[in-house]
Amino acid sequence: MRNKFTKKDFDKMFHTNDDCLEWIKNQQYPNGIECPTCKKITKHHKISKRPVYECDYCGHQISPLATTIFCKSTTPLRVWFGAIYEMATTRSGYSAKALQRKYGVTYKTAWRMFKERPFFGWGPGTYMFKYAPFQLEREKTEISTNAADLGNAHSEYIGPLSESGFPGMLSFLSIVILTIITGVRCWFHARNRKVRILSLSLLLGLITYYLHGLLNNFLDTDKASALFWGFTAAIVSIDIYHRDRQKR
């Protein structure tokens, strides 16, 4: 019978982010990494503080995460692997709230940062550098850090509030409100049934993310932001097109 893979085994095998990255590399390249420049399998070494490996001969760099769900994610690999382990080994399931309590930095820290500097915040993109002193001891998790290499506010609304104060959150809210108004206007004025369906589909997709953004944030990743701004641009384009036609 197969031995059970315990939490102790997991912690020993995946103790650091580099351990997780090494495991992914071995799964992606079981026979070694073939350098596209050297045209053969060569020795590669890990680049410090980056999830990439560099060829010892020509210096070409390759990332084992490039074709995985972890690509461009701001969440540390250790957290990804821990969440996957919990979900795979818990018979009764593991709720998203339980994962957040164990692995995530909650929006409460961001709220305390906002109260310290409510008007202009701490500066765009500074959350991970500033949040540690605002996190209470009882809220700390196994990924809490002072190294300024991870952490986010878990909210598209509270995040800008902590980093840019009232102007930051109001800017995002204005985008949300104006996009909804524009989407409804497109649906109302479009005469073509397909355009009406397209406008409504784009708007509903964005509203879904607006609601999701209350408790999480992914706009700092290219995969989510490309869809978010792409849907927004499509609604604006439809609106401009119909405005031009009405003037004619």
Image (cartoon, rainbow, N blue to C red):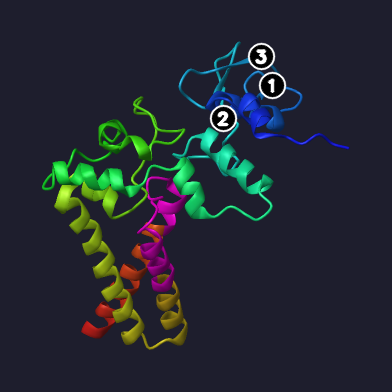
Look at the numbered disc 1 and give the secondary structure of its residue. Answer: loop
Q: Position of residue 95 (x, y in %)?
A: 54, 55
Quadrant of image for the C terminus: bottom left
Q: Residues within 10 Å of mark 2 (few under 14, many from 20)?
A: some
Magenta extent: 203-227
Q: Which residue is mark 1?
A: 39
Q: Is residue 139 left or right of residue 45?
A: left
Q: Amino acid at mark 3?
A: Lys
| Residue drawn at x 38%, y 56% as measured from the top left | 215
Q: Which residue is mark 3?
A: 43
Q: Position of residue 210 (x, y in %)?
A: 36, 63
Furthest toward the left, the residue is 119
Mark 1 or 2, nearer chain start: 1
The residue lying toward the viewer, choosing from 188 and 138, is 138
Q: Is residue 174 above or below residue 130?
A: below
Q: Position of residue 45 (x, y in %)?
A: 59, 15
Q: Which residue is mark 2?
A: 63
Q: Amino acid at mark 2?
A: Ser
Look at the numbered disc 2 and give the secondary structure of its residue. Answer: loop
Look at the numbered disc 3 and give the secondary structure of its residue. Answer: loop
User: Do we see residue 248 in this rendering?
Assistant: no
Residue 31 quadrant: top right
Mark 3 or 2, nearer chain start: 3
Compute the Cα span from label 3 to label 1.
12 Å
